[in-house]
């Protein structure tokens, strides 16, 4: 939105970094860099002419003071969900770490926050800064009307301070309606015009590893997404279920040396929405992959999935992708691959290996067509 409005804008996120349209993919499994590297990159962006920096900031970075000295002008909270409890220990500690972002914002610049008013912790965010805008589908300062969502996009109308915005978001999913509302709130605070906000949000056509569709001439839909938490599973799979009239197949795993408590939860959520669940490796590192799959399977069984019938455990991810592709056939079917998204490596016991999820899905689809 800022780039489209003519501002030189830098970006540092899980997916990529750079200035304006010179954006490169991230090569590491870390969202917010350590303090020395982060400060060096910010200096480089400034030297390159950047006026703004959009900095994705994690709870780990806040807890470990990686962003010490970063003068945030505006803080944006998307949601607080079941994640990283392996590090933070409790949900309360996790929330407290994330709230540090708004407390830093309260000491600098505009002292302005944008928060998800539908989140259960909304009140704590609203009171953490002197000024704020709340957004949501149910409550807040920005609540959309005339909301229309399809498998490809969403559109809605929202009014604020006498101005009505007609928003088109080309990345599908209810959670992207929330994300676009957050961007709208930032645009309002920074003084962008109605036209700049509308055109800027509509200008974003895709984000690598986020609801990316793979087209290789197959009749069914194939989707690659980075979702790897219970909340993201709930939101993404419920959206796909509503928009899939045929069979829905989901493939995923769970990273080793990360929060174990979420595995069964994600298995149960996947089993609730998908017709078939394929469990596979996902950065197992030095943890027994079969043990991880069994932990996930425990939750899938709770939602009624039966091994070898509606639930399948295939540790080798390329093989699992081929199998998942073989389970869908018609134009009404969808197969979705979760957990790796944009990442360019997969971590196994012997280290990192090159990985491209979308390319593996293309290979599996093409191989199936050739063999057929």
Image (spheres, rainbow, N blue to C red):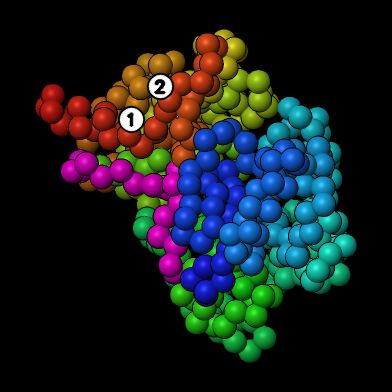
x 56%, y 25%: residue: 254
x 88%, y 62%: residue: 107
- Considering depth in this image, is 331 or 93 the residue closer to the camera? 93
Image depth: mark 2 or mark 1 in front: 1
Please state the horizontal and vertical placement of residue 291, each as a whole percent of the image.
57, 12
Q: Is residue 205 magenta?
A: yes
Measured Cα–Cα span from mark 2 to mark 1: 9 Å
Please state the horizontal and vertical placement of residue 311, each as a whole percent of the image.
42, 22
* Quarter that holds the C terminus: top left
Q: Is residue 209 magenta?
A: yes
Please state the horizontal and vertical placement of residue 265, each as a whole percent of the image.
61, 31
Residue 125 in sight here: no
- Considering the numbered disc 1 on the image, is that residue within a helix, a strand or a loop? helix
| Location of residue 161 with respect to 102 vertically, above or below | below
The answer to whether the residues at label 2 and label 1 have Cβ atoms under 8 Å apart is yes
| Location of residue 286 with respect to 209 vertically, above or below | above
x 32%, y 34%: residue: 359
- Considering depth in this image, is 243 or 141 the residue closer to the camera? 141
Q: Residue lying at the far bottom in this picture: please name it.
A: 162
By secondary structure, the bulk of the magenta-drawn segment is best described as loop
Q: Earlier in the sequence, mark 2 or mark 1?
A: 2
Q: Residue lying at the far front in this picture: please name it.
A: 47
- Considering depth in this image, is 300 or 255 the residue closer to the camera? 255
Side of 194 where 372 appears, left or right: left
Q: Which mark is residue 95?
A: none
| Magenta residue span | 202-219
Question: For mark 1, does the 10 Å Cα neighbourhood hold few (<14), some (14 to 19), or many (20 or more) residues?
Answer: some
Question: For mark 2, does the 10 Å Cα neighbourhood hold few (<14), some (14 to 19), or many (20 or more) residues?
Answer: many
- The residue singled out by tag 1 in the image is 360
Residue 362 in sight here: yes
x 20%, y 32%: residue: 366
- The residue singled out by tag 2 in the image is 317
């Amino acid at each position: 939105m800022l780039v489209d409005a003519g501002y030189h804008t830098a970006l540092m996120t899980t997916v990529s970094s750079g200035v304006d349209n010179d954006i490169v993919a991230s090569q590491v499994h870390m969202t917010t860099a350590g303090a020395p590297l982060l400060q060096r990159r910010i200096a480089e962006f400034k030297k390159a002419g950047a006026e703004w920096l959009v900095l994705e900031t994690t709870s780990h970075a806040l807890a470990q003071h990686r962003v010490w000295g970063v003068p945030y002008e505006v803080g944006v909270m998307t949601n607080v969900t079941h994640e990283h409890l392996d590090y933070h220990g409790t949900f309360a500690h996790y929330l407290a770490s994330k709230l540090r972002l708004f407390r830093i914002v309260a000491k600098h610049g505009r002292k302005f926050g944008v928060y998800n008013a539908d989140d259960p912790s909304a009140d704590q965010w609203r009171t953490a800064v002197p000024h704020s805008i709340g957004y949501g589908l149910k409550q807040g300062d920005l609540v959309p009307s005339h909301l229309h969502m399809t498998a490809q996009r969403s559109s809605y109308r929202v009014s604020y301070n006498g101005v009505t915005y007609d928003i088109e978001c080309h990345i599908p999913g209810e959670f992207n309606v929330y994300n676009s509302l957050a961007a709208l709130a930032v645009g309002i605070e920074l003084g962008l015009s109605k036209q700049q906000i509308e055109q800027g949000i509509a200008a974003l056509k895709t984000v690598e590893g986020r609801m990316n569709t793979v087209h290789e001439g197959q009749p069914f839909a194939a989707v690659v997404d980075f979702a790897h938490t219970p909340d993201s599973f709930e939101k993404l799979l419920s959206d796909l279920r509503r928009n899939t009239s045929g069979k829905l197949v989901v493939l995923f795993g769970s990273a080793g040396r990360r929060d174990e408590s979420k595995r069964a939860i994600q298995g149960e959520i996947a089993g609730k929405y998908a017709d078939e669940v394929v469990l596979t490796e996902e950065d197992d590192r030095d943890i027994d992959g079969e043990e991880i799959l069994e932990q996930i399977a425990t939750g899938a069984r709770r939602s009624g999935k039966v091994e070898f019938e509606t639930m399948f455990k295939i540790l080798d991810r390329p093989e699992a992708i081929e199998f998942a592709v073989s389970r869908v056939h018609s134009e009404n079917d969808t197969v979705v691959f979760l957990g790796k998204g944009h990442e360019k490596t997969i971590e196994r016991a012997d280290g990192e290996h090159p990985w491209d999820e979308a390319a593996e899905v293309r290979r599996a689809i093409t191989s199936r067509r050739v063999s057929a």
